[in-house]
Amino acid sequence: MTTNLSLSTSSGPAPKPPGHSPRARWHLGVNAIVVFWLALFAAAGSAHHFLPHSFWLLVHVLLLGAVTNAIVIWSGHFAASVLRLPEANRGAPAALRLLCLNAGAAGVIGGMLLDRWYAVLGGGCLVAAAVTAHAVWLVRLMRRALPGRFSMTVRYYVAACTLLPVGAGLGVVMARGDLAGDLPERLRIAHETINLLGWVGLTVAGTLITLWPTMLRTKVADGAERAGRTALPVLLTGLGAAVAGTLLGPPPLAAPGLVVYAAGLLLAGAPWLREALGKAPRSFAAWSVAAGCGWLAGSLAVLSGILLSTTSWITAGQRTSLLTAPLAAGWIAQVLLGALSFLVPVVLGGGPAAVRAATAGLERAWPARLAVTNAALLLCVLPVPPMVRVTCSVLLLVMLLYFLLLLLTTVVRGMRHRRAAARGNPLPAAAPVPERPHRVLGGVALGLAVVMLAVAGGAAADVRSLPVVERSGATSADGRAVTPTGRTTTVTVTIHGMRFSPSSVDVPAGNRLVITLRNTGTDTHDLVLETGARTGRLSPGDRGTLDAGVVGRDLEGWCSMVGHRQMGMVFAVRVTGDGSGAGAGSGSGRAATGTGQDGGTGHDAGTGHDHSGHGTSTVTKDTAADAFDPMAEPAAGFTARDAHLPPATSGAGHRVHKRTMTVKEVTREVAPGVRQKLWTFDGTAPGPVLRGRVGDVFEITLVNDGSIGHSVDFHAGSLAPNGPMRTLKPGESLTYRFTATRSGIWMYHCSTMPMSLHIANGMFGAVIIDPPGLPAVDREYVLVQSEFYLGAQGGTADPAKVNAKDYDMVAFNGYANQYDHDPLTAGPGERVRIWVLAAGPNGSSAFHVVGGQFDTVFREGAYDLGRGGQQSGGAQILDLAPASGGFVELTFPQPGDYPFVTHAMTDAERGAHGVFRVR
């Protein structure tokens, strides 16, 4: 005999008037937590572009926040119902468990966002403790109850609760980092398997045994109890096998466990199918749950295929990340929203009419909403243009917000009805709208039309999705057809930073070219050839394939993201041979594999590296400007110029600083692969830094060992320039003596005409005269900014470029981006002073530290901020005209990498960039 489960939690006396139901008040209060997490999920989804770890954040706000709270709240409700006990999951112990759970969730999420592992550890322990305490309460509840027909539902809940602490522990270990090899991927997949299929999956399966027929308003099918009892050990066995295979073996070893788990779901779900065939779903709740189960089935099939198709956990990890949206949004979120839409009206109570009215309010326009949700989600997981995916994501977010709005209005209306009923003046209930087949079909059609319009709008907004008039690459430069060879050149190209590596490939004429593109950078990129062939846009860590077809002429390629081509993300296909087909077309037609095989050779522009495996290439650059690549890496063992500034010599009285400075012509690397012949003071550009105090005397002997005339002008001294600043012929010397009468960072430079060229070619430096009473700091650095007008490789600066102010590169301390590769260091909370000089010869500086704020600014001999002045303000840049200087002070609030730049951003992108590494 079949019976229908009642959701009533007590068989005791008649309930109190609706307005005074403690059960309703409790459920409204605790489910407000679930609604809060759902609203937070919606807010995070709206602002995810501005949030760190945004994808991780969205997943955990939904699953750890909303779903885990819902499971703890409603599993207690259902456990008491099926065991026929007065609901005891209320009061102080239950509230304490929820408080512990939510404090733990906040700790985990906050710890990850703030990079505080101990907060993640503490939060994970709190979550595990709360769920374990819930499991203990469920076990005690079963021991109190008499044997019941559906008590196996509670066993599902207990099994799920024992799995979550294991999954949480794996998550805490992953957050710690320092994992080698493929262990991060193994742990992540095991973590997701336990939490999604164990914690969530077992709970959903146990609940649907009784909730599904109740949603359909039919009786529980014969054999449902037996199927549920038999399925639980099968599900646990499959889950354990899948996790063990993930941690101990290759991916195919985990697939059988998933198959066993799927078999357990089929065993438990067979009665659900019979129930649905007996009475078809007619509500949002039932169809939402059914759609969610469909997404679960599809995801399990795809996941099994992924595991069987590769032996690499790294590859499996990349592919399984595509299943996050189907599982989280398609399955779990739809089941949660469907369950809430059914249960909330029951909890609100107020009699059958009030329950029907509340249900109607939550199911408003449900066919259209379900159609929009599932069609948009399907498009999100398919390979569609990015803007189409964005518009579909917005639709999903709108559907969630609309549900939350309906939920809020339904609860408010229900509370108003209950208060009116308690006063003996019940409000009239809205007449339920009968659900007719044509209304359902019309709603589905409306939802699909909304999605189609969104797709059209997204496609129109994304120029990459518009038709492209392609020009075939299978012709030679003069338009002649090229005979296909039947062979394929396959090349792997990797994105590093803002560069393709290799940046070009040699392909025999007539070969088909296939490029595998791997994005190891931190931004989204793609590769487009002039023929119109292209990859999709690739997020960091993704890979794509570009099939260029048969190639018969040189082709240009680039990244189509805005500004990336201008920053040097270009690629070249170089065709070798004449494409006549003589000999070339007589091969076996085999497809080459690997990087640049079957005649394909890759080259990195400007580096001299040959990726063909045959040694060093002969790729050269005629000018240093051609060789300059802001993203290039220096040679192994590179050490940046020491920017540390020793303190001025202490002691009473004024000191005399005597030094000999020799003009030397040296050839130096000024950027990776870029060499210039520099005119220097003492062999470095900038020249040596001199430091003293007000009143000190500097006696500098200048010796010209160069091949042309040079001189020196010290801005730190005030004297007639006729004698000491005269030009010295090669081999001559002079002594330049001055007294430092005013504080500041002062430029010195060669003053021989053309002065601009002499400065541009390296003849400049800094003299620092401390302001009186300058306090000591923890660290002190000096940075001299200058621009380069690059000439030939190994040659001097280009005079025409100098005259036109057409510079190629900007650098701090004479080498582009050197402090990116060898960062300056500081500690959290340490006070750091940075002296900056804009040496020019023509460019200004807007010195800025990303993530920092200056509380002290000294510019051109005076404090703009700090040292007795206004103390509540701050500064973001130190703005300096050519030949001016100053210093700034700041403290770094926490560990991390803090870039510093000139905020004239094109100059920063040309090499005026570095990093403070705070540890």
Image: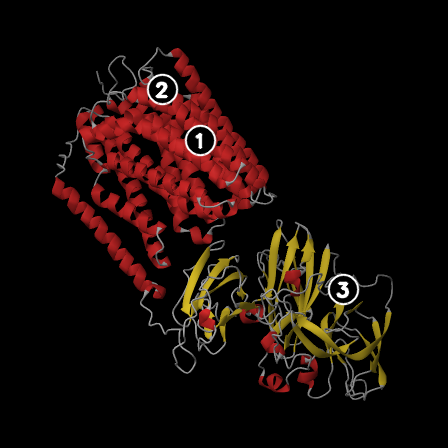
Given the image, on which type of amino acid does mark 2 rest? Met
Going from N to C along the chain, the mark reached first, 2 or 1, is 2
* Crowd rating for badge 2 (residues with CA inside 10 Å; few <14, some 14–19, many 20+): many
Pointer 3 local density, CA inside 10 Å: few below 14, some 14–19, many at least 20: few
Image: 446 above or below 499: above
Q: Residue at x 46, y 61 (%)?
A: 591
Residue 72 x %, y %:
40, 28
**616 lies left or right of 61:** right
Q: Which residue is mark 3?
A: 772
Residue 152 numbered mark, or none: 2
Q: Is residue 888 left or right of residue 450?
A: right
Mark sitting on residue 239: 1
Residue 550 x, y percent position in the rendering: 41, 70
Foreground label between 3 and 1: 1
Report if the CB atoms under discs 2 and 1 are less than 8 Å apart. Answer: no
Where is the N terminus found, in terms of image quarters? top left
253 sits left or right of 886 in the view: left
Give the alpha-carbon distance from disc 3 to disc 1, as whole Å.
Answer: 72 Å
Q: How many marks?
A: 3
Between disc 3 and disc 1, whose residue precedes?
1
Q: Earlier in the sequence, mark 2 or mark 3?
A: 2
Looking at the image, residue 305 lies above or below residue 529: above
Q: Position of residue 752 (x, y in %)?
A: 73, 87
Q: Residue 609, how many percent across, how many down?
A: 62, 68
Identified at 39% across, 72% down, the residue is 531
